[in-house]
Amino acid sequence: MSRLIVVTRPALVTGFQLAGVDAYGADDVETAQELINGWLEAGEVGLLAIDDGLLVRMDPAFVKHLDSCDQLPYLAIPGGQSLGPEASRRYRIAEMIRRAIGFHVTFKGEETEGSK
């Protein structure tokens, strides 16, 4: 796997391209999903890096399909500013860790789901 493909906000594309990475801008989730779906259908091979603000808003069925695709594995990258209220710094970090190790991490002082 020798190709890295980045899907991020248009304002960040130039920086990735200057670093020699194939980067594509997406203003919204629908545009990002269309780009990625096109690569899946074309049989692209590589590593896909997706702005976490876009990834958390993608259709769960689409993300499940992407999870099952061996030719284009993906990872979330921090995009800087949040795209929504749920994309806090702690949330992004916890999601990256969960994706990497398969477990949900709770920070000290946070309530776990279902506890109250």
Image (cartoon, grey):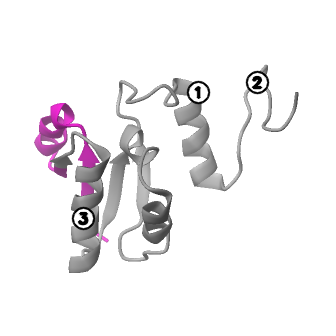
Three-letter residue code for mark 1: Arg
Classify residue 101 as left or right of residue 62.
Answer: right
> Is residue 7 on the magenta stretch?
yes
Q: Residues within 10 Å of mark 3 (few under 14, many from 20)?
A: few
The amino acid type found where label 2 is placed reads: Glu
Q: Quadrant of the C terminus?
A: top right
**Residue receiving disc 3:** 3
Q: The magenta stretch spans which residues?
A: 1-23
What residue type is disc 3 on? Arg
In the picture, measured across the screen, residue 77 lies left or right of residue 26, that is right
Element carrying mark 3: loop
Q: Considering depth in this image, is 78 or 55 the residue closer to the camera?
A: 55
Find numbered disc 2 in the image and state the secondary structure of the residue it sits on. Answer: loop
Q: Is residue 26 above or below residue 37?
A: above
| Mark 3 or mark 1, earlier in chain | 3
Q: Which residue is mark 2?
A: 110
